[in-house]
Amino acid sequence: MVLGGESRRNALFTELLHSIHVRSSVFARPELRSPWGFTLEDEEPAFHIVTRGRCWLTLDGPGGAVELAEGDFAVLPRGGTHTLRDTPSTRPVRLDRSLKDRLRDPDGVFRAGGDGVATVLVCGNFRFDGASSDVLIRVLPPVIHVKRKGSRLAAWLAATMRHVQSGLDAGAPAADAVVARIADILFIQAVATYLESNALTAETGWLGALRDREIGAAIELLHEHPERPWTVESLARALGLSRSAFAARFMQFVGEPPLGYLTRVRLAAAAARLRSGDEKVSAIASSLGYESVSGFNKAFKQRFGATPGAYRGRSCTRTGAEDNNADGAAWYARGDESRHRKGATP
């Protein structure tokens, strides 16, 4: 039975949030004095939190510049090339491996830029389990900006950042692991805030689709009953639409055909069950509408690069703190030789 609009949204939001599985997070703590600017190329999903000062974030492509004030945080669910700088007019420097490989200061802070006003950040990468992000990344915008002022998370974020900062300042052995876990929560909060804030106003994309009576109902059917042998024709009939009209509207809102979306839903559900239990692969395949285990194995491996059995084994042995101190922790480095050069200078 198709739920009402609000109930439908809440159920799908809950499912989406439960699907988030962050494998690891890598942090850096830059202290940058104006003028400064960096372009980070081909980054993994990333976040930036401003603990002091302010800066500008610009994505490579459409979206414009976003001003981040003290206490704000920004999440880039798809990563990609983006620029951070003190002002929109500062010319950025490409952050290449020579900068990443430099040693940080004894206090654990990376310092760069000139002699002007300081901006202090906590930055890092999210590394998602491929399955958990498969549907999620398509739902989210290129950047989610959560503002400290006026946000329902204001008090929580302030308290969280005090805890992060005190742990990092103290240099506690477990600080990186603690901050890594907090990053997971920050990401989920950012996603939840985005969904709640745009649920009633989105005109396009997945959220816009949920607001559409027929396409929203179709999405619910695919999530509620992924095991059914859906075709474009059967979905259209269930909604009282012609095949062509339904297919066109679904593609317009969601950005992919209905059966492509169904495949993503099925495999994301399969991955979650493989991670969380010891259910037989054959039972998972059958319950999600696959006629054969070999067909399911082929689809799963094509999407995630591993068979269901290998994926389950990898998930069982993986630790949450994996890679927290990897090379990506050295995002920003000191550049004394160019400290006084004008125009952006690491």
Image (cartoon, rainbow, N blue to C red):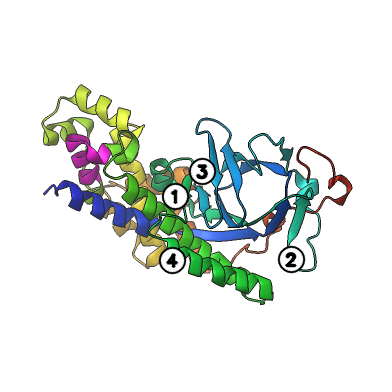
Between label 2 and label 3, give the one nearer the viewer. Answer: 2
Mark 1 lies on residue:
133
At x 51% / y 30%, what residue is drawn? 62
Q: Earlier in the sequence, mark 2 or mark 4?
A: 2
At x 21% / y 22%, what residue is drawn? 244
**Front one among 59 and 293:** 59
Residue 21 seen: yes
Please state the horizontal and vertical placement of residue 302, each as a whole percent of the image: 46, 42
Is disc 2 placed on a helix, strand or loop?
Answer: loop
**Front one among 249 and 34:** 34
Please state the horizontal and vertical placement of residue 201, each as a whole percent of the image: 29, 40
Q: Are marks 4 and 3 in contact (CB under 8 Å)?
A: no
Is disc 1 placed on a helix, strand or loop?
Answer: helix
Q: Earlier in the sequence, mark 2 or mark 3?
A: 3
Q: Are marks 2 and 4 in contact (CB under 8 Å)?
A: no
Residue 319 seen: no
The amino acid sitting under disc 2 is Gly
Is disc 3 placed on a helix, strand or loop?
Answer: loop
Between label 2 and label 1, give the one nearer the viewer. Answer: 2
Between label 4 and label 1, give the one nearer the viewer. Answer: 4
The amino acid sitting under disc 3 is Arg
Is 317 part of what is drawn in magenta?
Answer: no
Between label 2 and label 4, give the one nearer the viewer. Answer: 4
Q: Which mark is residue 155?
A: 4
* Span shown in magenta: 209-222
Q: Earlier in the sequence, mark 3 or mark 1?
A: 3
Mark 2 lies on residue:
108
Is 211 part of what is drawn in magenta?
Answer: yes
* Residue 198 falls left or right of residue 177: left
Is disc 4 placed on a helix, strand or loop?
Answer: helix
Between label 4 and label 3, give the one nearer the viewer. Answer: 4
Mark 3 lies on residue:
78
